[in-house]
Every structure is written in C-alpha cells, then in structure tokens.
C-alpha cells in the first residue's frame, strides 16, 4: 500500500545532459565570512549595485555577512556594502579558492562561479558548476581514495544518479544540492587521475529502473554479508532495493564487530522505552545464532527496533545479535552503515575480481539498467 501511495505522486520529466547545478558550499559550518581567491585566471565581481571589480589571480576578497547584506573588502582595503555579490570568470578553465575561517572545512578549490548573500544566521555561498565537473570530488569524498578503476566507475554512476534524481532537493532554499552528507559530500575540484578518469569514462551514465526512472542510488560502507531492503530501514519500498546475499564484503575489516555496554546503560535504555529490566528476553540471541536482519521485535507490547538500539548505543550498524555477558550486554554485529543498496567494500572486491561497473551496480540494484541521462526520467517531488 505504501508503494502505491508513493508512486501516485510521480510525474516524469526528462533529465538534461550535464546540466548546471547550484551547490551550497560550507553547508555544515555555515560561516558568516569567507575569503575568495582566484587560483587560476582572473575573475569579475558584480555586486548588483552597478559596481564591477576585477579580481586578479592570487588576489583575495573577503566577504562578510552584515545583517541582511554583505560587505566585501579587497586586498587594497576597498570595501562596499551590497545585497549580494556574484563572482564569475570569462575563462571556463579558471579556478578559485574559498576559505572559511571557522569550522573544520578549510579551503575548497572550485570552478564555475559563486554567488554570496546573507542568509539567516550565516552566509549563503552557492557554487554554480555542472554535474560532471563536481562528480570527481564527490566520488573521492564518498568512495575513498583507494580501489580499482571499475569500483570508481560504479561509484561515479551511483553518485551521478543521485545528483540528477535530487536536483530539486533544496528547491525551496533556492539551490539544487548542498556539499554535506544531507546530499553528497563535495570537497571541491580534485586531481586524482584514477577517479577523474572513472568519471570521464562513464560520463552521462546513470542507473534507472524498469520504467526508466532514476533510482534511489543508496550505498553504504559494508553490509556484513547481506544488504537490507529499503522497506525494512526506511519504510519506502523500491523493487531494486531488496536484501541481497553478498559474499564479496565478508573479508573486510568492517564485516564483523562487537561492542559491550554496561548493564546499567542497557537497563536505562529499556526504561526509556517503557520496559522494566528483565522483560527483554526475546531480544537475546541463543548461543551460536548468526545475526539476521530482523529490524523490529515486540517486547511486552512495545516495539523495539534494531535502529533504536543502534542509535542509542552508537553501533556501526543495525545488523547484530544481543547476548548477556558477565560484564554487561554484548552486541555481535556485522557491517557498517544502513545496509541498503551498494556495499562499497563488496563493490571494491568485485572490481578487484574483474567485474565491470555495470555488473557491480546490477548486483546491488537488481532489475536496474545503466543508460545515458538523456534517456532517463526523474520523479518530481509532490
């Protein structure tokens, strides 16, 4: 029933090839001041009030939030108040650096243009670029820096699919995507030749379902030998996000883990769920039992989910057994992450074994196809 309700809201639009995207930079730290420095080529600053400033390579401009406006100051000390500033270059190969004086995000190397204006409590810093130009940085941040080329090709297709499907994720905020985990982590332009080549080799390639709709391209670090169905984790049902037995990731360090918590902490958790300690016997696994992806159990009329337990005790995954020990409660777990979709450790192992990127994505998203984005469609949010 849930699936029928979700699909009733889907309207289809063709996706554009390598479209322009507006990405919010420093979405996590939300600074009130940033430093702009051209690292290759000159740029032009326009402030919307008719002022036009040439910013030479390696010169810097500081932009600071001031109430509902911004103040920008040049390296010569010239400063102006404006509603917003837009900084562009006539050279498509030009690059610039954006530095945030606060937080841990540091400096980002970017291409395209940037628009900066006041936003509630911070600056709104928007980088205008393209999906393809932003992709290598996203793949590097989300997939790590080591692995065979086919692994990165698979991740490139997954990340590109996510970007196109979610172009309207921040529509109400006035931009497409953010650079944090809410969307996909985007550290900026990178020069890793293996990852750049993987993105170039798969340019325009996305994953679609049997109706040519861009899929929900979920992924995680390690599934522990069995992926999870989306219906068990997020309620929403997708025919390609089903549980898949995965022998490829089981040799990874993240495939198995255990954690012991003090009995007092366990009892506090039970009480927070409206239970009395001693009522939870159904949660304990008999000796020798292997973990299973049972996500919700009824305990004395209360539903206790593995996800509730995972979050409360900061466990690596919701795929575990629970047993008593002399010094507390022991979780014997598998995997790392939510377990839905592509398993990165498994995909890396498949690539090392000679599997092609289409085989990898087909394994983790059964019934899907890879096609050019110009042939794909995306759902419009209700």
Image: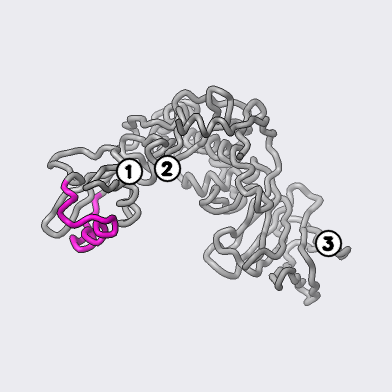
Q: What segment carries the magenta color? A: 258-281
Q: Is residue 335 magenta?
A: no
Q: Which of the image's four quarters has the C terminus?
A: top right
Which of the 4 image quarters holds residue 349? Answer: top left
Mark 2 or 3: in front is 3
Q: Are marks 1 and 3 in contact (CB under 8 Å)?
A: no
Q: For this view, does 255 lie left or right of residue 37? A: left
Q: First in sequence, mark 2 or 3: give its number.
A: 3
The number of numbered badges drawn on the structure is 3
Q: Which residue is mark 2?
A: 220
Which of the marked residues, 2 or 1, is nearer the chain's N terminus? Answer: 2
Q: Is residue 62 visible?
A: no
Residue under label 3, please give it.
48
State the CA–CA distance, disc 2 to disc 3.
Answer: 43 Å
C-alpha span from label 1 to label 3? 52 Å
Q: Residue furthest front?
A: 301
Q: CA distance from mark 2 to mark 1?
A: 9 Å
Report helix, strand or loop for mark 2: strand
x and y percent of residue 334 in the render?
29, 43
Count residues near mark 1 (Cα–Cα under 10 Å), then give few for <14, some for 14-19, many for 20+: many
In the image: residue 48, left or right of residue 173 = right
Q: Which residue is mark 1?
A: 335
Residue depth check, mark 1 versus mark 3: number of the one nearer the observer: 3
Which residue occupies the foreground of this view, 323 or 18? 323
Whether pointer 2 and pointer 1 mark residues with C-beta atoms closer than 8 Å, the reply is yes
């Amino acid at each position: 029933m849930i699936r029928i309700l979700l699909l009733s809201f889907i309207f289809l639009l063709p996706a554009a090839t390598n479209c322009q995207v507006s990405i919010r930079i420093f979405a996590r730290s939300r600074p009130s001041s940033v430093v702009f420095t051209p690292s290759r080529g000159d740029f032009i600053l326009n402030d919307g009030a008719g002022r036009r400033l040439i910013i030479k390579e390696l010169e810097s401009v500081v932009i600071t939030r001031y109430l509902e406006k911004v103040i920008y100051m040049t390296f010569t000390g010239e400063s102006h108040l404006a509603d917003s500033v837009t900084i562009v270059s006539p050279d498509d190969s030009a690059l610039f650096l954006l530095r945030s004086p606060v937080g841990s995000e540091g400096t980002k190397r970017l291409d395209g243009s940037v628009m900066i204006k006041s936003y509630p409590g911070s600056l709104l810093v928007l980088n205008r670029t393209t999906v393809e130009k932003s992709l290598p940085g996203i793949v590097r941040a989300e997939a790590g820096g080591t692995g065979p080329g086919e692994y990165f090709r698979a991740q490139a297709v997954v990340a590109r699919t996510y970007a196109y499907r979610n172009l309207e994720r921040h529509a109400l905020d006035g931009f497409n995507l953010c650079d944090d985990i809410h969307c996909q982590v985007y550290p900026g332009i990178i020069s890793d030749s293996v990852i750049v080549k993987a993105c170039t080799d798969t340019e325009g390639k996305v994953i679609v379902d049997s109706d040519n709709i861009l899929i929900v391209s979920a992924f995680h670090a390690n599934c522990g030998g069995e992926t999870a169905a989306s219906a068990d984790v997020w309620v929403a049902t997708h025919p390609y996000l089903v549980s898949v037995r995965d022998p490829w990731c089981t040799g990874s360090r993240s495939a198995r883990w255990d954690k012991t918590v003090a009995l007092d902490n366990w009892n506090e958790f039970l009480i927070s769920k409206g239970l009395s300690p001693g009522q939870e016997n159904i949660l304990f696994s008999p000796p020798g039992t292997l973990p299973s992806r049972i996500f919700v159990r009824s305990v004395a009329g209360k539903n206790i989910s593995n996800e509730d337990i995972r979050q409360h005790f900061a466990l690596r995954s919701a795929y575990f057994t629970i047993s008593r020990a002399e010094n507390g409660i022991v979780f014997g777990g598998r995997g790392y992450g939510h377990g839905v979709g592509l398993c990165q450790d498994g995909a890396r192992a498949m690539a090392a074994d000679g599997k092609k990127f289409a085989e990898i994505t087909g394994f983790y998203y059964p019934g899907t196809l890879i096609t050019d984005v110009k042939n794909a469609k995306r759902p419009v949010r209700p």
